Image (cartoon, grey):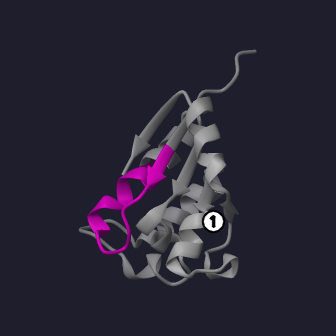
């Protein structure tokens, strides 16, 4: 049986740019539905997206609040990772993030990029 394809979505945009936040979450959720392993990696200002209480404040157009889409992505099996060094830079602790988010080291991003069949940056 062939190995599943892997997609990596890197979120560097933060809550200060709400319209840039929906695409990676939607695309990752769709990838999972297409039987593609999807990972969302939050880096730099992107970590603000998964800080507790922040995604509930984001709603663009007719889309539901971003928090709902993040929960659907998690339920679909999208892996969500946060850069530990970005957390330190922004003064956030491991407990500051929504459920289902894993804090990982910077080397993890390099490994993910090398292993992915495709990457997209937002």
Magenta stretch bounds: 9-26
56 sits left or right of 63 in the view: right
Can you give x and y, in whole percent of width and height, for residue 4 in the image?
66, 26
In this view of the protein, which residue sits in the foreground, 99 or 8?
8
Q: Is residue 33 visible?
A: no
Is residue 10 rendered magenta in the image? yes
Can you identify the residue that label 1 sits on? 84
Q: Residue at x 65, y 47 (%)?
A: 108
In the image, is residue 26 above or below residue 35?
A: below
Q: Residue at x 68, y 65 (%)?
A: 100
Is residue 53 rendered magenta in the image? no
Can you give x and y, in whole percent of width and height, for residue 93 in the image?
65, 80
Q: Residue furthest right?
A: 1
In the image, is residue 35 above or below residue 98?
A: above
Q: Is residue 60 visible?
A: yes
In this view of the protein, which residue sits in the foreground, 18 or 31?
18
């Amino acid at each position: 049986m062939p190995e599943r394809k892997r997609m990596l979505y890197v979120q560097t945009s933060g809550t200060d740019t709400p319209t840039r936040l929906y695409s990676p979450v939607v695309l990752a959720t769709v990838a999972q539905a297409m039987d593609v392993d999807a990972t969302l990696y939050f880096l730099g200002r992107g970590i603000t997206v998964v800080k507790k209480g922040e995604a509930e404040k984001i709603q663009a157009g007719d889309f539901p609040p971003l928090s709902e889409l993040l929960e659907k992505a998690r339920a679909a099996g999208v892996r969500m990772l946060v850069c530990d060094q970005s957390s330190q830079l922004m003064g956030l602790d491991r407990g500051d993030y929504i459920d289902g988010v894993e804090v990982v080291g910077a080397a993890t991003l390099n490994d993910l990029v090398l292993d992915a069949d495709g990457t997209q940056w937002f």
